[in-house]
């Protein structure tokens, strides 16, 4: 032991302790933003379609205060590292790299849209695991954005935050993602899933009360090593955009299931046909899921979740053996439905289960992993939680 105080376990306390230790001062406030899972609607967001994510109880907390000059200093417990940048680095996308790029990207996006961003010091602590597909990057962006808007008294209503945080990720970090993650993280509400029309950005909070239905949502971290996920994501997006151009529509959202066969008949490439079929049927599965939840039929969404997984596996081809194993084992152990959530090539699987059988389903998945020689998965049950917020 070195005599240093043990790090506090609570994420907000860790952010505050990190701020005091790095900067020898008190933060002006603490802002939190959660990770997310997507209940259904995968790779539909950048096709102007529908998604239904919810915010997780796992959060990233940013303790922050303004500094007198126009520079930004960031410490994160994730890398136990301090990064400092000024306007020159902030104004040139790509200049700040690694985890701090998500912070610099937000500063860039705010400045690029004409906001006078105050210089600031940040200390970041997080319970959102990195690399598990639970949007740890959107959580950092959103918590930093919330902090800067308030510290700078910026005129920027929360409804515009998701698009701005997405720009940080697309244009500063260079990841061609859609608007789902930032929307879930910013606009999520406890006890609800967020039904988002990614074209109009209209949202509807859909009650998703697992507890009173005696259900639980099991999140299984597949622990699958990332296999070229970034390049595969970009290539899926490109195929979709090319397919929309071939079909003469603004986006694949404009092809509805009733017109799917006719649209497929106009495409000559089999792989492109499968990509289009995934997106069009997935949009419909989101709409069907929303209809069932509005009717209070939570259990009945199970087959739609499983259908979404099959579509991602067979048509969009973004699953890997670990996630397929987790889905199969969860279903065999009695889950009502199961699917990979997020961009693919690893990440997490969701399984809708009776609350009383969550442990047994988790154990069954762990056993199936051991049989296949995979590293043990992580498991936890979650309820929809609140989006980005100021803590105090
Ligand atoms: C990632 C992206 F960031 C989202 O925008 C979305 O496209 C998702 O993959 C797939 O649905 O999380």
Image (cartoon, grey):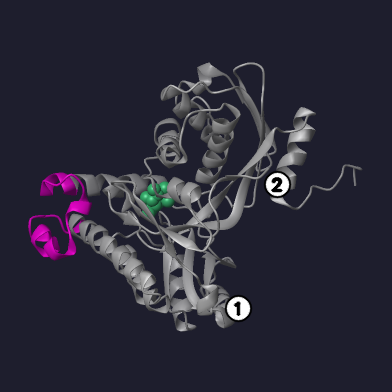
Q: Residue at x 52, y 33 (%)?
A: 101
Q: How many labels does the image show?
A: 2
| Residue 163 position in % (x across, y down) | 40, 39
Question: Which of the 4 image quarters holds residue 284?
Answer: bottom left
Q: Give the CA distance from mark 1 to mark 2.
A: 29 Å
Note whether residue 20 is visible: yes
Q: What element carries label 1?
A: helix
Q: Does the residue labelled 1 lie within 8 Å of ligand 1?
A: no
| Residue 64 position in % (x across, y down) | 66, 33
Q: Nearer the viewer, residue 308 or 95?
A: 308
Of callouts 1 and 2, the N-terminal one: 2
Q: Which residue is drawn at 37% across and 69% down?
A: 294
Note whether 12 is above or below 372 in the view shown. Answer: above
Q: Which numbered disc, 1 or 2, marks the residue closer to the eye?
A: 2
Q: Is mark 2 on a helix, strand or loop?
A: helix
Note whether 182 is above or below 262 in the view shown. Answer: above
Q: Which mark is residue 359?
A: 1
| Residue 273 position in % (x across, y down) | 18, 58
Residue 114 painted magenta: no
Q: Nearer the viewer, residue 268 or 112?
A: 112
Q: Which residues fall within the magenta stretch?
A: 243-271
Tags 1 and 2 in contact by the CB under 8 Å rule? no
Q: Which residue is drawn at 47% across and 65% down?
A: 349
Quarter of the image with the C terminus is top right
Residue bearing mark 2: 12
Q: Residue at x 46, y 79 (%)?
A: 335
| Residue 173 position in % (x across, y down) | 45, 34
């Amino acid at each position: 032991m070195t005599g240093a105080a043990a790090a506090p376990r609570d994420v907000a306390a860790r952010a505050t302790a990190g701020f005091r230790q790095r900067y020898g001062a008190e933060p002006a406030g603490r802002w939190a933003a959660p990770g997310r899972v997507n209940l259904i609607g995968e790779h539909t967001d950048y096709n102007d379609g529908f998604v239904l994510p919810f915010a997780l109880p796992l959060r990233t907390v940013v303790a922050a205060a303004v500094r007198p000059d126009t520079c930004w200093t960031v410490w994160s417990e994730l890398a136990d590292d301090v990064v400092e940048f000024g306007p020159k680095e902030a104004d040139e996308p790509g200049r700040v790299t690694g985890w701090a790029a998500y912070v610099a990207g937000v500063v860039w996006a705010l400045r690029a849209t004409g906001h006078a961003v105050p210089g600031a010091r940040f200390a970041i602590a997080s319970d959102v695991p990195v690399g598990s597909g639970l949007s740890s990057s959107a959580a950092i962006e959103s918590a930093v954005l919330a902090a800067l808007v308030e510290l700078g008294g910026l005129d920027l209503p929360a409804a515009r935050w998701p698009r701005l945080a997405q720009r940080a990720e697309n244009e500063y970090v260079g990841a061609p993602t859609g608007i789902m993650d930032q929307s879930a993280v910013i606009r999520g509400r406890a006890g609800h899933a967020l039904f988002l029309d990614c074209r109009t950005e209209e949202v509807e909070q859909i009650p998703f009360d697992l507890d009173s239905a005696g259900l639980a949502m099991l999140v299984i971290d597949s622990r699958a090593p990332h296999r070229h996920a970034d390049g595969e994501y970009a290539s899926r997006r490109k195929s979709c955009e090319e397919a929309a151009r071939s079909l003469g529509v603004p986006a694949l959202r404009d092809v509805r299931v009733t017109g799917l066969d006719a649209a497929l008949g106009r495409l000559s490439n089999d792989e492109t046909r499968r990509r289009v079929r995934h997106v069009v049927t997935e949009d419909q599965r989101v709409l069907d899921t929303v209809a069932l939840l509005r009717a209070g039929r939570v259990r009945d969404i199970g087959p739609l979740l499983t259908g979404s997984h099959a579509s991602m596996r067979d048509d969009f081809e973004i699953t890997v053996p670990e996630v397929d194993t987790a889905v199969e084992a969860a279903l065999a152990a009695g889950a009502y439905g199961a699917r990979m959530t997020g961009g693919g090539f690893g990440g997490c699987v969701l399984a809708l289960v009776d609350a009383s059988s969550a442990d047994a389903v988790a154990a069954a998945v762990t056993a199936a992993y051991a049989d296949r020689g995979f590293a043990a998965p992580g498991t936890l049950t979650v309820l929809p939680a609140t989006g980005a917020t100021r803590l105090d």
